[in-house]
Amino acid sequence: MDNTAPAPAAHGDADSSLLEGLFQLAVNGQTQGWEFDQIDNEVYARLLSTYGVDGKKAA
């Protein structure tokens, strides 16, 4: 029985999928639609939660 959990990889895969989707939309010039806005907002929120400090830029 394998007790190793792929949870960190799954989280990383979700992040990679978001970035890939955002990249593909940008490459195809589809930056004015709801899908781009939704993915962009999610990526930006995750970046702020990881690197932002109380709404200020991290050093």
Image (cartoon, rainbow, N blue to C red):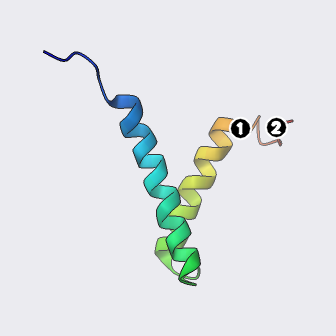
Residue receiving disc 2:
58
Residue projecting furthest to the left: 1
Type of residue at label 2? Ala
For disc 2, the neighbor class at 10 Å (few under 14, some 14 to 19, many from 20) is few
The reply to whether dot 2 and dot 1 touch (C-beta < 8 Å) is yes
Q: Residue at x 35, y 30 (%)?
A: 7
Near-viewer residue (30 or 6): 6
Q: Which mark is residue 4?
A: none
Relative to 31, 8 lies left or right:
left
As helix, strand or loop, the secondary structure at mark 2 comes to: loop
Q: Which mark is residue 51?
A: 1
Q: Residue at x 58, y 59 (%)?
A: 41
Q: Quadrant of residue 6?
A: top left
> Looking at the figure, which quarter contains the C terminus?
top right
Q: Position of residue 2 (x, y in %)?
A: 19, 18
Identify the mark nearer the N-term, 2 or 1.
1
Real-space CA distance between mark 2 and mark 1, rounded to the nearest whole angstrom: 6 Å
Near-viewer residue (8 or 58): 8
Near-viewer residue (37 or 17): 17
As helix, strand or loop, the secondary structure at mark 1 comes to: helix
Q: Position of residue 48 (x, y in %)?
A: 67, 44
Residue 37 to residue 16: above or below: below
> Looking at the figure, which quarter contains the N terminus?
top left
For disc 1, the neighbor class at 10 Å (few under 14, some 14 to 19, many from 20) is some
Residue projecting furthest to the right: 59
Q: Quadrant of residue 13?
A: top left
Q: Quadrant of residue 47?
A: top right
Type of residue at label 1? Tyr
